[in-house]
Image (tube, rainbow, N blue to C red):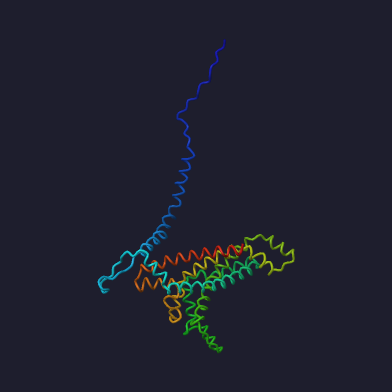
Amino acid sequence: MSTLTRPAKVATDSPVRRTSPRRTGRRGAYKGLLFTLPFLVGFLVTYVLPIAYAFDQSLHEKKSTGLGFGPTRVVYAGFANFSSIMSDSGFWAATLRTLLFGLAQITVMLGISLLLALLLDGVAARAVRFFRAGLLIPYVIPAVVSTLMWLFLYSPTGSPVLDLAGKAGWHPEFFGGINTYLSLGNLLTWQGIGFNMILISASLQALPRELYEAARLDGAREWRIAWSVKVPNITGILVLTGMFSLIGRLQLFTEPLLLRQVAPESINTDFTPMMEIFDRAFKTGDYQYAAAESLVLAAVTGVLAFVFYRVTNRKMS
């Protein structure tokens, strides 16, 4: 009889270690956290902490000791500052004034930006790059520099525009009444047309060209294609640019502050809510009330932006 022998097992130096999927997932999560750590630190330092500090300041107020002639000290006041803001007619008048002005100015600015984008959409590629670069220059210029430039053009003394108008027998006034809003609106529109036009133009370039060819085969002219094909397909970017512009107008500060140098009667210290907050904090010295106003303005801006986004999306869908 033959004896059957089993093959010997091959000896290994060390057992094979298998990494569990859970441990691999944890390592990936740790690596992802390390990559996002610089952003999280920057977000915490530049965004979360200032808001927390402003909220802490808004819960305090300055009180004078004695009969009001002694030194002031900061005491806890709870939500007293917020209650005072609810009945502060100056703050709400500035907010309403800026909001109404912004709605009118944004409508004109986006209308011009849309028109320019539609015109550039039918131009050759080389010409489009040239015009895009030229129209984007006002946005690249810092707000202070562009405001000072227009301040020189609006100035009653030394303005070449007023000199030419005077020779033609026309003496325009850039400030006073409605002219103040027109001058400020002209400046803001000049600054924002190029940037919004670039965004709208990029959305138009992303549309499939087959839509235009189908419309032309149906006998539609170019203006009809623009109104019935192009514009309905870029409503998303129009809503987005409108929302961003609305947020920017409620935070309007630099331009009216500089224009006030030549028109102090037309642009007062509470012309916009940001100017009122600045005056309250750095001229009056009431940092606590100014912090509360800043938080209220941020909340109002967020609510209005959300409502604007929902309403415009519902109408355009």
| Res 190 quadrant in image | bottom right
Q: Nearer the viewer, residue 263 or 97?
A: 97
Q: Is residue 138 left or right of residue 260?
A: right
Q: Count the labels in the image.
A: 0
Residue shown at 52% from the left, 72% from the top: 102
Residue shown at 43% from the left, 75% from the top: 270
Q: Is residue 15 left or right of residue 282?
A: right
Q: Residue furthest top?
A: 1
Quadrant location, the C terminus: bottom right
Residue shown at 46% from the left, 80% from the top: 266
Q: Is residue 128 left or right of residue 61?
A: right
Quadrant location, the N terminus: top right
> Residue 52 in the image: x percent, y percent?
39, 60
| Res 229 quadrant in image | bottom right
> Residue 188 in the image: x percent, y percent?
51, 73
Q: Nearer the viewer, residue 31 or 214?
A: 214
Q: Please, is residue 182 above or below residue 222 in the view? A: below
> Residue 34 in the image: x percent, y percent?
44, 49
> Residue 196 in the image: x percent, y percent?
56, 67
